[in-house]
Amino acid sequence: MTFDEQKARLAGVVAIPVTPFDADGAVDADNYGKLVERLVTAGIEVVTPNGNTGEFYTLDEPEARRCLELTVKAVDGRASVLAGVGHNLAAATRAARHAADLGADMIMIHQPVHPYVSANGWVDYHAAIADAVPELGIVLYLRNPAIGGEQLARLGDSCSNVIGVKYAVPDVVRFASVSRDAGLERFVWIAGLAELSAPGYFAAGATGFTSGLVNVDPKTSLGMFTSLNSGDFPDAMKLWERVRPFEEMRAANGNANNVSVVKDALGQLGLCRPDVRPPSRLLTGPEKEQLFGLLSSWGLS
């Protein structure tokens, strides 16, 4: 695909699949493939293995490679594969090359986890990875409010394959400013805080959003995108109200149960085990009951 074709697909629902584990705690390859198949069959056009909903930071390097391999196999050319990469520069570059060798379409570079991130160093980190895979589209995962339009524009000038920004700073005013300083039409701007933030970020210029909820209820996520894409904000907000309790469960206590809620929902639907790895935890009994009530109200359980 050309970079323009990749950008067109990013302007949609970017699904972040969970990583199911088996009874021994290993990646459950069979269920992983089934979950990805479910997303693609529902109409998802971009799948992001090794994202945060996929518990990227709990996976070792062989496991992350395995998840990408399973995704490419399950997608089978029917959607774009946006592979999550990150950690130290050497590991991220190895993962990027592996993605290119497997035939992934794009990579998403996770926000660097380091206590001392300089603006120039941030640009250098991403440029080094982008330069290692010039054939792949690059999506930046931006969670740091200190990175502004100047850095994004400079990175875009030096690396023509940087095509999108997953913006996950919870500040729509900051997003509006950064996107315009960097070039609103230059990159695809993806609301990186899922459905609850999507209407506000779309109003400020985003054209796509990421989703973990889509693992559970693809129809609702795709419906919200259709409404936002057509400018029907009242209809989008009806769906926003529907998913609000679910997303608030995920966001509670500093996002402590962000993945746990999604996986437990999938477990209640019989699609995979609810197991998560530390530092996440399983839901409590009352939390499970609350989630069951939500799924029942949606007609899913």
Image: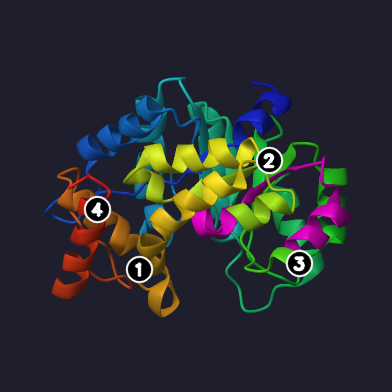
* Precedes in sequence: disc 1 or disc 4: 1
Residue 290: where, in percent of width, then height? 22, 67
Q: Which residue is mark 3?
A: 174
Q: What percent of the width, then of the height, locates residue 46?
A: 51, 34
Q: Residue at x 57, y 61 (%)?
A: 88
> Label 4, label 3: how many angstroms apart (C-alpha)?
36 Å
**Residue found at x 75% / y 50%:** 127
Q: Residue furthest front?
A: 234
Segment colored magenta: 175-198
How many numbered dots are placed on residues in this image?
A: 4
Amino acid carrying label 2: it is Ala
In this view, 130 is above or below 30: below
Q: Check disc 1 and give the amino acid type.
A: Met
What residue is pinned by disc 4? Answer: 297
Is residue 188 highlighted in magenta?
yes
Q: Are marks 4 and 3 in contact (CB under 8 Å)?
A: no
Among the two numbered marks 2 and 4 on one chain, the one whose residue lies closer to the N terminus: 2
Rendered residue at 60%/73% (across/down) = 114
The amino acid type of the residue labelled 3 equals Arg
- Which residue has dot 2 on it? 132
Q: Give the left or right position of residue 107, taking residue 264 as reference.
A: right
Give the image location of residue 188, x and y in percent: 71, 41
Q: Could you give the CA–CA distance between mark 2 and mark 1, rounded to whole angstroms?
A: 39 Å
Measure how far apart labels 2 and 4 are at the Cα level: 48 Å
Identify the secondary structure beneath mark 2.
Answer: helix
